[in-house]
Image (cartoon, helix red, strand yellow):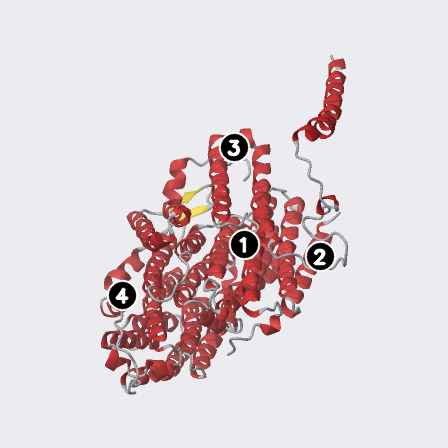
Amino acid sequence: MGSAVQWLSFSDVWRSMGPELIVIGGAFLIMLIELLLPQQQRKVTPWLAVIDVLLAALVTIARFGGGILLYSNADYVVDGFSSLFKLLILLGTFFVLLLAIAEQRKQSLPYEYSYLMLFASGGAMIITSGIDLVLLYVGLELLSIATYILVALNRKDARSSEGGLKYLIIGSIASASILYGLSFLYGVAGSTNLGQIAVTLQNAWANDGTILFVSFALILAGVAVKISVVPFHLWTPDVYEGAPTPVTAYLAVISKAAVIAFFLRVFLFVYGAKYQDWWLVIAWLAVLTMIIGNFGALAQRNVKRILAYSSIGQVGYLLMPFAAIGQTQNVNDMWQALSATVFYLFAYAFMTIGAFAIFGKVAQMRGSEQVEAFAGLYRTHPWLAAMMAIFLLSLAGLPLTGGFFGKFMIFLVAFNAGQYWLGVILFATSAVAFYYYFGILKAIFVQEPPADVESSRSGSMLTVLVGLCALGTLVLGLLPDPFLHILNTVHWFG
Amino acid sequence: MALQPFLALGAVLFGIGLYGALTKRNLIIVLISIEMMLNAANINLVAFAHFLPKPNIEGQVYALFNIAIAAAEVAVGLAILLSFFRARNTSDVRDMNAMKW
Amino acid sequence: MYGNNYLFVLIFLALGVFLPVSSLMVIGPLLRPNHPSRAKTTTYESGLEPVGDARARYNVRYYLFALLFVIFDVEIVFLYPWAVEYKHLGVFGFVEMLIFILLLVIGLVYAWRKKVLEWK
């Protein structure tokens, strides 16, 4: 905000932040509508949120590939990276909203979730586009604070508020750690703009190396908590178990994707010059996360906690491309790593939301969250059972699914960069993952259903949602070429 | 005055806050400790804004945003704490034990 | 020229004395109903018992009012710098600030409709 300030015009704001404006403005509108409608008519509000998300997605797609646009003194950027992450966030929000509507029929979640999810997604979208420390932090906190409320939303269940409280305390400590680290970045570079920080820092490592290392460690620790990287993962199973199932899916997919975007943007911009010095830290964190996440799931009998531990393991896979390209200096490797991460995030979104959707339905029908609750699902609900099989096999990484192709791409990145050991650990931990997913599959297909089970219908909404998720998973596995083409031609960074 | 005393104050505040947030048993004290951590960052930002080779106002603006965010965070924190208190009739960290791994 | 300034001071001083004295001592007693009771004569302590242990528990409902205060608190934090640079920021800044205040008003309306302002 020096002398060469360019003033924004309203059309600039619309062109740069259109999707965010739709999502956040829509959230305020829906909040007012929910407030003024009588109690019986409030069930339209989630549908309004769905329409809002679709509108924002349309605007994002319409601007996709329009080149790189910088706004507001280069504080806000619309590039391929941000557009792809925004699409992922909107897609995830769309599915989670549908899941919440489907769950709503039986279990009365207050309708506040519809606009709280929009606020959180708005924050997530700001993270993907902001290249200013202030914007990044405001977006991160908008996402975090809205999700704290979402986790604690089910006031009838004491576990929900306990999970919310745990998430709030751990998340706030992480935010404070990130903020403290960012303040040192500002102190060294004298600017809050990531581009200017990147330029200044290339010369600053000689004098201020220590303080920059401190800021690196603080930001990394905070980010690691937020995306539940081992050894900062202990909150994850508790919070996932306590939160209402749609919110768990939201945390596992959208919240994680947004913080990974934050991580990639900040670390590649700011610390990119010293990449050779820190890639090994990321590599070890990824390895630890893959191992502990997958082995931790073995000890669990509660399916929600199994899925929580499996999502910890998936974060290890998501971090791996960046760990792998550490020693190579080739910029094409970085684009390949970004492609692999984004591809896997999309596949992860489809299969995770689908798995949580079916879990929520089964837990509701059988009144239990244990693996045994899935017993004989194939007899009573063949459609749900088949879809669950697709999601679990994709999470485990069986060929013909999106999960397999994503893992294959990640493996290729590691292979090209010569980091064979990371590839080996990827496959070894996937084999472990097979074991606990197989436990659920055995319950579904082999065990007999309990005698007293009533044959309730699965609900058309849920059937459609699960079908869409399965379709996405299979398309990414069988016909990945169109999507790969987009990933290969996109201009990643502004 | 030099920059270092302010940074030292920030570091001490952050350390006390982190220690309090991780060890205290009363959830209200934990929330206060988190506020201290955020304010440590604010002190850093304002001090840097003043003592930079080319002083600028961005650090102060950043601190203003952080104050607003911290207010929102603690408001939500107290609200969730209240709902936890209503469900369990306690505000002790050790009683957050309905779910264990 | 500068003598006028002291005249203004004098006028404001006179008004400053006259208005509170007239409203408190003369107009007020004429207009207000007069029903003294024991509770009304105690020291005002925001609804708490004024005498007793200092470590008394506060009613948790105060917390909601404290939250509402935060809305206006934060509003001022952003309004003040904006007001200082008002001319410099121009129409864009003005509209932005109007939107900001509108969003805070929505928050207040929300609290109002959810019956936060009522003491049950």
Report the amino acid beneath label 3: Leu
- At 32% from the left edge and 76% from the top edge, which residue is drawn? A392
Considering the numbered disc 1 on the image, is that residue within a helix, a strand or a loop?
helix
Total number of numbered labels?
A: 4
* Cα gap from disc 4 to disc 3, whole angstroms: 48 Å
Q: Which residue is mark 2?
A: B8
**Label 4 CA crowd tier, 10 Å (few <14, some 14–19, many 20+):** many
> Is label 3 or label 1 in front?
3
**Label 3 CA crowd tier, 10 Å (few <14, some 14–19, many 20+):** some
Report the amino acid beneath label 4: Gly
Q: Which residue is mark 3?
A: C89
Residue A361, above or below A149: below
> Is label 2 or label 4 in front?
4
Q: Nearer the viewer, residue A333 or A264?
A: A264
> Is label 1 or label 2 in front?
2
Residue C114 visible in this rendered orientation of the protein: yes
* Cα gap from disc 2 to disc 3, whole angstroms: 36 Å
Q: Which residue is mark 4?
A: A472
Q: Chain of mark 3?
A: C
Residue A139 on image: x %, y %: 48, 53
